[in-house]
Image (spheres, rainbow, N blue to C red):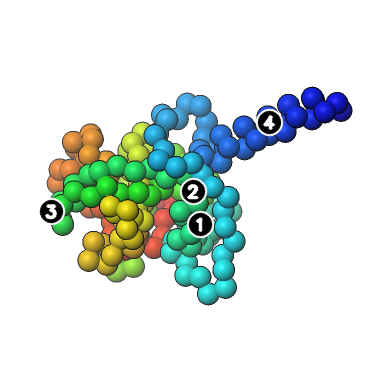
Amino acid sequence: MTPLHFARAALSVLFLHSATAQTWGAPASWKPFTYARPAQATPVRKPGERIMLELDGTAGTLKLTLRQLQAMPAVRYATPHRQLKQTYTYQGVTLRDLAARGGFAGRDLRVYASNGYFTTIRASDYMTDPIMLAYSADGKAITAQQKGPLTVVLPAQPERYHGPDYGAAWVWYVERIAPLR
């Protein structure tokens, strides 16, 4: 292989890696989301580092730390929080990217909170709109008073997400996501 061929092959791998890393293998048919930050290399869990989210995937349960969640591609948008009666600019990982990482994208999700609450989020919603699992609000970690450290956040549009039918989708204190069986 000549140096020119080697360089082209290396660039092809680099471009392919960055595209799949940002979308976690998303097919071209998926509606593109606008990411605030692309995916980064997934850090190895440090001894004693707290597991923040369990993702019940097709190959078993994936246990993710906050640093590992923050390494995934991030979306950021401002949206009103009805219960707190305040608008925050949230940042986090889309449910679509989490479902793709777990191997169950396109299936309805069950989202579980540490207080025993759970709800179902339809695939038709999270696959087309950037519904996120937020880990920061206004650039800071989400406090327990703000319903954190992890909370499901719905975008400001479409407006239907802020009516009574979707109030249950704002899951606070999220600890586990699984496909609906």
How many labels were placed on the picture? 4
Q: What residue sits right under mark 1 in the picture?
A: 68
Residue at position x 51%, y 35% in the image: 26
**Left or right of residue 159: residue 148:** right
* Label whose residue precedes the other's in the sequence (1 or 3): 1
Question: x, y percentage for residue 25?
Answer: 55, 37
Q: What residue sits right under mark 3 in the picture?
A: 85
Residue 22 in sight here: yes
Furthest residue to the right?
1
Would you say the residues marked 2 and 1 are in contact, meaning their CB atoms lie under 8 Å apart? yes
Question: x, y percentage for residue 134?
Answer: 34, 52
Instruction: Give the mark toward the camera: 4 or 2.
Output: 4
Q: What residue sits right under mark 2 in the picture?
A: 72
- For the residue marked with disc 2, what is the amino acid? Met
Q: Quadrant of the N terminus?
A: top right
* Label whose residue precedes the other's in the sequence (3 or 2): 2
State the image quarter where residue 84 is shown: bottom left
Residue 120 in sight here: no
Q: What residue sits right under mark 4 in the picture?
A: 11
* Label whose residue precedes the other's in the sequence (4 or 1): 4
